[in-house]
Amino acid sequence: MTPVSTLHLGPGNPDQPRGCGPLAPPRSPAPRPLRQQIFEQVRAMGEVSRGQLARELGVSPASVTTQTSELIEQGYLTEVPLVPGAEPLRGRPPVALRVAAGAHAVAGVKFSMRKHVAVALDFAGNQIAEASEPARDRAPPGDQIEVLARLIGSVCAEAGIGPGDLAQVGIGVPGFVDHASGRVHWSPVFGARDVDLAQAASARLGLPVIVDNDANLAALAELWFGSGRTLSDFAVVTLEHGLGMGLVLNHRVFRGALGLGVELGHTKVELDGALCRCGQRGCLEAYVADYALAREAHVALDLAGGSVGGGAEGGADLVERLYAEAKAGNAVAQSIFRRAGRYLALGLANVINVFDPELLILSGERMRYDYLHAQETIAEVGGSVLPARATPPRIEVHAWGDLLGAHGAGALALGAVTDRRIGGPFEGAAA
């Protein structure tokens, strides 16, 4: 098994290629208009000559010239001096194409149990502003909408634009989310069920809003900005207050028939097992999430702690104390983390056996608890995958934190604007 990586990839990393968005074409291309394919390829590559663009897409130089001329005229692409080494089309001046970053701006917001984070992105995918606000546990939906409005106001002020200048807002929340309708059936961040978040947020902001599960947006962020840009199939497992998973198949986020698929945290690992915050028993999340660790700490170390699914702050404090005990050599605390790590290894092995991803990314705030992804845990993953595999998939640990989900929400918004203004289904649409 490949050792766990400690790469920290993300926007602004000098090791990242220019641009944003998937760099590799899907095996079965979606029926997108050529103009959208051209625009998205330019955005993905950051800067490219017309000749290279024609070769990348396998189309004629004349088609590229016609489509790019329209996109330039409409203000979506711009010409810049040709980068060294690129080849211009015969007879054309030595220029390259780049997305007109100022054509549109979007905002992406991630709600979580600890803090809410927002970013503003320009049309080329560059971050132009960031804001955050501490979370309030299980606040009424109306209160969370006001938090959203404040965050949008903050990032717009930092970016020097008005909220009305945004073309789209993307929102990521943990829980059971119907991406197509924008409804949140259940989320730990809301004090109510069945919240029509997209409609309520759009009415408050006066802007188009699109909503998705935060783990899906973690995968979308990796697809647009991180290690997934050149891969067709990969999975992101997020471990924060709960356990989530985002799955990319053939360069597209997979959500299932009803938009509620890939709920790794609620796969069952024990019959009549521990109580999960979803109300059922035996879920994987109930053995590895922070409230599960806090429950074990409360019992084993006689520490004060909340109940299952209780306050995020109290549970987080208790887990921090448990981790400090483990680092100090407390054998009981170490055994609690190692037991959780074994359950996590079981879940990861199941993901590999079912989906056969090229890459498995472990992400989220709880990844700093290294006992959960210690070498023996990773080795246990390797020992539980199908022996027919020549080599197990690469496993990496990323630590973007809440910024990951916010960028994923921003990518979702960028895709929606691209779809609406340039045409064709956008990346991140339900597969």
Image: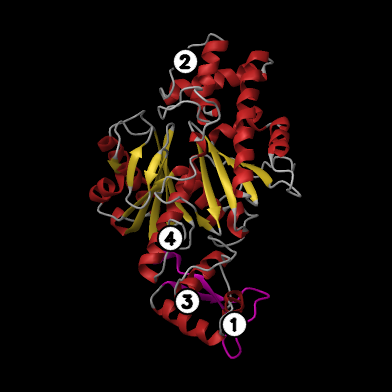
Does label 2 or label 1 sit earlier along the sequence? 1
Residue range highlighted in magenta: 76-103
Which residue is labeled 2 in the image?
Answer: 305
**Distance of mark 2 from mark 3, alpha carbons?**
57 Å
Q: How is the image coloured?
A: secondary structure
**Distance of mark 4 from mark 3, alpha carbons?**
16 Å
Q: Secondary structure at mark 3?
A: helix
Instruction: Rate crowding at label 3 as few (under 14), some (14 to 19) or many (20 or more) other CA atoms within 10 Å.
Output: some
Q: Nearer the viewer, mark 2 or mark 1?
A: 2
Q: Position of residue 306 (x, y in %)?
A: 44, 17
Instruction: Rate crowding at label 1 as few (under 14), some (14 to 19) or many (20 or more) other CA atoms within 10 Å.
Output: some
Q: Secondary structure at mark 2?
A: loop
**Distance of mark 4 from mark 2, alpha carbons?**
42 Å
- The relative height of residue 261 versus residue 45 in the rendered view (above or below) is above
Does label 2 or label 3 sit earlier along the sequence? 3
Q: Residue furthest front?
A: 271
